[in-house]
Image: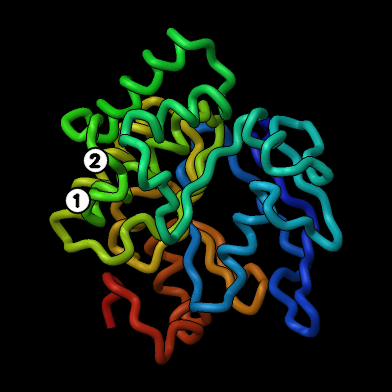
Amino acid sequence: MTSPLLALSDVSKRFGQVLVAERLSLAVADGELLGIVGPNGAGKTTLFAMISGDVRPDAGEIHLGGRAVTALGPAARTRLGIGRTYQVPRPFEHMTVFENVLTGAVHGARLGRERARESALRVLALTGLLSTANQPAGRLNLLARKRLEIARALATGPSVLLLDEVAGGLTDPEVDELLAIVGTLRAEGLTVLWIEHVVHALLRSVDRLVCLAAGALIADGEPAAVMADRTVREVYLGATVRGVPS
């Protein structure tokens, strides 16, 4: 069996009395597109924070490409190939779109000036932002900000990309535009982990789906089967989840 590109083994995290991850184990294959669902407070964003290095787990191990990265900070993990987006886009608002992406290429991927410029232009083209390259990021609408959030992460040259609710707040046609970008990334062989409440977007895109609840993994498998699972449906009771048939 081929070793996973990303592996979490018995990872746990507690904030005070609140347990947000309990002995989580997860393996993600090279080139896999993995969807992650769960109700609010399930521990999904904390999971990403532990993978990216923003939060240190209390117990357990995280490996990337067979290398232990548990003790490394976010900058080191970025250089090793972990890129992430955030639920609320975080652009440098007074810099142009191009400058935002260039910053990722220079400081994340550590490319020289000319290669960083070429990489930034390629990423802008891939994410549909070339026409706004010279606009200040602070003037972008929500869809363009979501695109830029993805572009900034891609500019760091990741082997693993963490997408955190990039479809949130968008209309269905705008979600379709983002799905086209994700489809391109998949075709290029990038490994993607995607947290999303707009479940129909995941069901149209991912290879595998996992569900978290109260910091624990409660389902893992084929996307439609996971969403049909009785326990998964029960944890969503009282929550609004777009795209899940009743």
Question: Does the CB distance between marks 1 and 2 fall below 8 Å?
Answer: yes
At x 36%, y 38%, the residue is 95
Q: Quadrant of the C terminus?
A: bottom left
Q: Secondary structure at mark 1?
A: helix
At x 49%, y 24%, the residue is 105
What amino acid is found at the position of numbered circle 1 in the picture?
A: Asp
Tag on residue 128? Answer: none
The percent position of residue 152, horizontal first and vertical second, equals 43, 37
Other-residue count near label 1 (Cα within 10 Å), few / some / many at <14 / 14–19 / ≥20: some
The residue lying toward the viewer, choosing from 131 and 80, is 131
Vertical relation: 201 (above or below) 147: below
The percent position of residue 185, horizontal first and vertical second, equals 37, 33
The residue pinned by badge 1 equals 176
At x 63%, y 63%, the residue is 46
Q: Quadrant of the N terminus?
A: top right
In screen coordinates, is 81 left or right of 165? right
Let me know if residue 180 appears in the view: yes
